[in-house]
Amino acid sequence: MGGRIKIKKFKLKTWQLLILLVPLLFIDATMMRADHIRMTELRDAVLTADEENDDEKIAATLAELKSFVFSNIVINVVDDNGNQKVMFGTGPFYLEHQYLRAANKALEEAEKTIANDNNPNGNIYAMAGEVCRPQAIANGWAWDNPNYINCMMTEIQKYPSSEDLQDQIIASLPSTELYRHNYASPMWAPTFTGFMLLITLIIIVVIFIRVVIWAVLHISLLFIR
């Protein structure tokens, strides 16, 4: 009785930490890849909804993608003018079909305006359509195809007296930035992946400090001798 309980300190050696680091790095890479794949799936769901012209589904899938990216560590490699760039998040992506629907609607409104306009050249929109519609049919363009929209704008701009109407049409076209999305993820998040990365970082720092101390001590011994 009265004896004291001795607590033995448990301390991993540097070589043991190095061995432990190997599986930790593998787990980190696996978890980060899983988060990246999940982000890609959610982003593809947004693009699929865009292709289906389903605005409600687009809003729902965008919200799900945004929530996931904002609460997880997502590392992505994106193309930046031909250069591969590593970034945290989705990288920029565009809702092309939603934009084209909005642009086509703006052109339809412009058609009504031009049809009621007392332009000396007549109904400029109809004249542009006579040129562009055969091209659309020959090339299989839908009326919301960017090639068709560009053709219409090019033909309308051939009439100097329609300058005010051109400005009106251009002003009515929606900005492409409204349909461009780029969600950034945090560099660290309180998820399983985040805590595994934190543990790995701590072990790397401990190993680095021990190696530095070992090197300093051995260099000092050289001068003492």
Image (spheres, grey):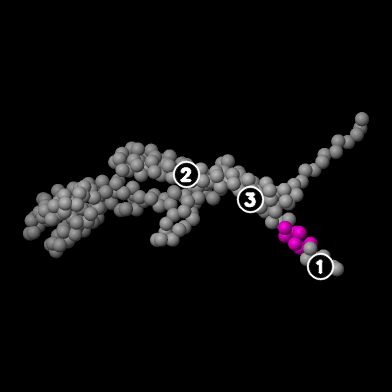
Residue identified by numbered label 1: 222
In this view, 220 is above or below 87? below
Spot occupied by residue 73 in the image (x, y as percentages of width and height)? 52, 46
Q: Residue at (47%, 49%) from the top-left corner?
A: 89
- Give the mark nearer the N terminus: 2 vs 1: 2
The amino acid beneath tag 1 is Leu
Query: From mark 2 to mark 1, how far is it between C-alphas?
Result: 53 Å
> Of the numbered discs in the image, which one, if any, rests on residue 201?
3
Residue 110 visible in the snapshot: no
Disc 3 crowd, CA 10 A, few/some/many (<14, 14-19, 20+): some
- Give the mark nearer the N terminus: 3 vs 1: 3
In the rendered picture of this protein, how many numbered marks are placed on residues? Answer: 3
Name the residue furthest top: 1
- The quarter of the image holding the N terminus is top right
Query: From mark 3 to mark 1, how far is it between C-alphas?
Result: 32 Å
Q: What stretch is highlighted in magenta?
A: 211-217
> Of the numbered discs in the image, which one, if any, rests on residue 37?
2
Q: Which of the 4 image quarters holds residue 54? A: top left
Query: From mark 2 to mark 3, how far is it between C-alphas?
Result: 23 Å
Spot occupied by residue 75 in the image (x, y as percentages of width and height)? 50, 50
Name the residue furthest right: 1
